[in-house]
């Protein structure tokens, strides 16, 4: 990858088919950064980090590893982590290795990973960051690889704006969410958030969530319902259901979220993005569909964390 100048984002995909190919390319990317005096953040799934560590020399420079299966369980957490890393190194260029999609992720998770990749182009459009995103070409569906190529078209990816970032977004990421199952409990609400909290807490306990996870889900749903009261003139509808793997809570209201990075950038407590930030931090996956007809926020919590 050529070294970009100044504050221009470089955001490239790397499709690999073997572990040696994977490790060699990432190590070369890291070493090139270290040689240029650039700190590197590496977020890859699980044990893959050790494969990279084993090939790195103990030379000077900063390389920070984090497990993408934890950081990127909800892909909306990744951009804030990269931003925080860059903020720790002001005035210089940094590098990031981020692998947000891997075999075994659900269709919903892969869709949100694709949304994350498109939003990277907006969040860091003029930032001095060089990003490499590995994709397992032998284990991921061809559609995921096609989505990756769409989001990593350089230099167009470095010039994304609020109007153009969606050009890199797969069409399925903007389609309405699938309907909740027939057995989902439906609860309209207006100003009675205490009833919302009681309902969610009861479902969470019956689903077997731990005490802390129950608190997190109640907090997340309460934040979204509070946004209805604070930022719209109408009421909202909560739907909640269980699957063998997770508990899902969905809130719909008549508001529209106009900032595509809402929930990925810290805001003040009076901004709607503040509530979405908290929701993204505590939920395992958050799906948002928004437009003139209203906003739907679907929050997932795994029953076994």
Image (tube, rainbow, N blue to C red):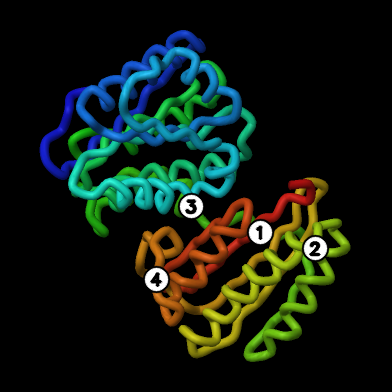
Q: Nearer the viewer, mark 3 or mark 1?
A: 3
- Around disc 1, counting alpha carbons within 10 Å, would you say few (fewer than 14), some (14 to 19), or many (20 or more)? few
For label 2, the SS is helix
Q: Using the numbered discs, state the Cα–Cα distance from disc 1 to disc 2 in whole angstroms.
A: 29 Å
Question: Of callouts 1 and 2, which one flags the residue occurring earlier in the amino acid sequence?
Answer: 1
The answer to whether mark 4 and mark 2 are in CB contact below 8 A is no
Residue 179: mark in rendering: 1
Residue drawn at (23%, 49%) of the image = 90
Coordinates of residue 238 in the picture (x, y in percent): 68, 73
Q: Nearer the viewer, mark 1 or mark 2?
A: 2
Q: Nearer the viewer, mark 3 or mark 4?
A: 4
For label 4, the SS is loop
Question: Of callouts 4 and 1, which one flags the residue occurring earlier in the amino acid sequence?
Answer: 1
Relative depth, front residue between 240 and 213: 213
The answer to whether mark 4 and mark 1 are in CB contact below 8 A is no
The answer to whether mark 1 and mark 2 are in CB contact below 8 A is no
Question: Of callouts 3 and 4, which one flags the residue occurring earlier in the amino acid sequence?
Answer: 3
Q: Using the numbered discs, state the Cα–Cα distance from disc 3 to disc 4 in whole angstroms.
A: 15 Å
Coordinates of residue 61 in the picture (x, y in percent): 31, 29
- Around disc 3, counting alpha carbons within 10 Å, would you say few (fewer than 14), some (14 to 19), or many (20 or more)? many
For label 3, the SS is helix
The answer to whether mark 3 and mark 2 are in CB contact below 8 A is no
Coordinates of residue 80 in the picture (x, y in percent): 41, 53
The answer to whether mark 3 and mark 4 are in CB contact below 8 A is no
- Around disc 2, counting alpha carbons within 10 Å, would you say few (fewer than 14), some (14 to 19), or many (20 or more)? few
The residue identified by callout 3 is: 76
Q: Is residue 87 visible?
A: yes
Q: Using the numbered discs, state the Cα–Cα distance from disc 4 to disc 1 in whole angstroms.
A: 31 Å
Residue 211: mark in rendering: 2
């Amino acid at each position: 990858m050529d070294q970009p100048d100044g504050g221009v984002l470089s955001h490239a995909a790397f499709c690999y088919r073997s572990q040696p190919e994977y490790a060699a390319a990432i190590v070369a990317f890291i070493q090139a950064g270290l040689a240029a005096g650039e700190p590197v953040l590496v977020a890859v799934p699980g044990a893959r980090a050790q494969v990279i560590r084993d090939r790195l020399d103990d030379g000077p420079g900063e390389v920070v590893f984090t497990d993408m299966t934890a950081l990127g369980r909800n892909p909306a957490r990744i951009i804030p982590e990269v931003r925080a890393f860059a903020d720790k190194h002001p005035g210089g260029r940094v590098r990031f290795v981020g692998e947000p999609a891997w075999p075994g992720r659900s269709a919903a998770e892969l869709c949100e990973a694709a949304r994350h990749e498109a939003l990277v182009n907006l969040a860091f459009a003029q930032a001095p960051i060089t990003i490499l995103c590995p994709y397992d070409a032998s284990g991921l569906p061809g559609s995921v690889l096609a989505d990756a190529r769409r989001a990593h078209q350089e230099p167009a990816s470095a010039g994304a704006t609020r109007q153009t970032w969606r050009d890199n977004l797969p069409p399925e990421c903007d389609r309405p969410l699938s309907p909740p199952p027939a057995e989902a409990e439906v609860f309209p609400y207006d100003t009675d958030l205490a009833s919302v909290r009681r309902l969610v807490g009861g479902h969470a306990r019956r689903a077997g969530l731990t005490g802390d996870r129950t608190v997190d889900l109640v907090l997340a749903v309460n934040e979204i319902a509070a946004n209805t009261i604070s930022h719209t003139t109408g009421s909202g509808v909560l739907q909640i259901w269980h699957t063998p793997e997770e508990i899902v809570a969905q809130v719909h209201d008549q508001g529209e979220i106009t900032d595509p990075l809402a929930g990925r950038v810290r805001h003040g407590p009076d901004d709607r993005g503040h509530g979405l930030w908290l929701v993204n931090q505590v939920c395992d996956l958050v799906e948002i569909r928004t437009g003139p007809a209203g906003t739907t926020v679907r929050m997932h919590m795994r029953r076994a964390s």
